[in-house]
Image (spheres, coloured by chain):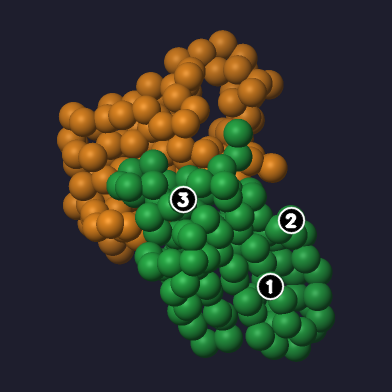
Chain colours: A green, B orange
Amino acid sequence: TQLLEQSPQFLSIQEGENLTVYCNSSSVFSSLQWYRQEPGEGPVLLVTVVTGGEVKKLKRLTFQFGDARKDSSLHITAAQPGDTGLYLCAGARGGFQKLVFGTGTRLLVSP
Amino acid sequence: DAGITQSPRYKITETGRQVTLMCHQTWSHSYMFWYRQDLGHGLRLIYYSAAADITDKGEVPDGYVVSRSKTENFPLTLESATRSQTSVYFCASCSGGVPGELFFGEGSRLTVL
């Protein structure tokens, strides 16, 4: 059973376009993280959100945690080829020791 | 350089053989984790450790054994490899906090024939 479902699974866009990636669950999480993974490497943390309704911005990336803490979204404005990678959301239920990862969204941004 | 390193990066083995994947971190992080990554499943937690000599099962522990005699090392052993254990394995560490930031190694790609 996959607790965190991400959509879309794959996204191929042109440089300059905007996009949104969704991370949904029927479970409540105490916090949620977003990681980006490039080929041949491990995931790297982008952001952590802990409060329902919280919005965080990281340059052209905007992260939102749902009011009920069951879902999250990642919006990229004016995507660049350097944004290419696998985006993973990860939810913590109580302690982080059993962080649950989403299924992933693979993004390709072409010049 | 400080960091988290995994070895080997690539391994091909046969069904029934024992395989050990090594993980070493230089940050003295208390927490260490082993995940496997498969298409359509994202990352799934196999085992984790809160400190030396303290380990606990994750989501998919069957067929795997871990130990942590030293804070910096967290080896993962497949006692009798099966084809279903073909995967990319990631080790991660964390200093703590709620939630903490996980620092991942580069992964070990294991193929079981």
User: Residue B47: percent from the left, percent from the top?
Assistant: 38, 32
Question: Which residue corresponds to mark 3?
Answer: A28
Question: Which residue corresponds to mark 1?
Answer: A20
Q: Residue at x 59, y 71 (%)?
A: A74
Query: Do pointers 1 and 2 mark residues of a single chain?
Result: yes
Determine if residue A35 is in view.
no
Total number of numbered discs in the rendering: 3
Determine if residue A109 is in view.
yes
First in sequence: mark 1 vs mark 3 = 1
Callout 3 secondary element? loop
Residue A9's disc number: 2
Q: Nearer the viewer, residue B26 or A18?
A: A18
Callout 2: 10 Å neighbours few (<14), some, many (20+)? Answer: some
In the rendered image of this protein, does residue B105 appear above or below residue A36?
above
Q: Is residue A58 left or right of residue B103?
A: right
Q: Residue at x 61, y 55 (%)?
A: A24
User: Residue A93: percent from the left, percent from the top?
Assistant: 39, 47
Q: Residue at x 56, y 80 (%)?
A: A61
Label 1 vs label 2: CA separation?
Answer: 12 Å
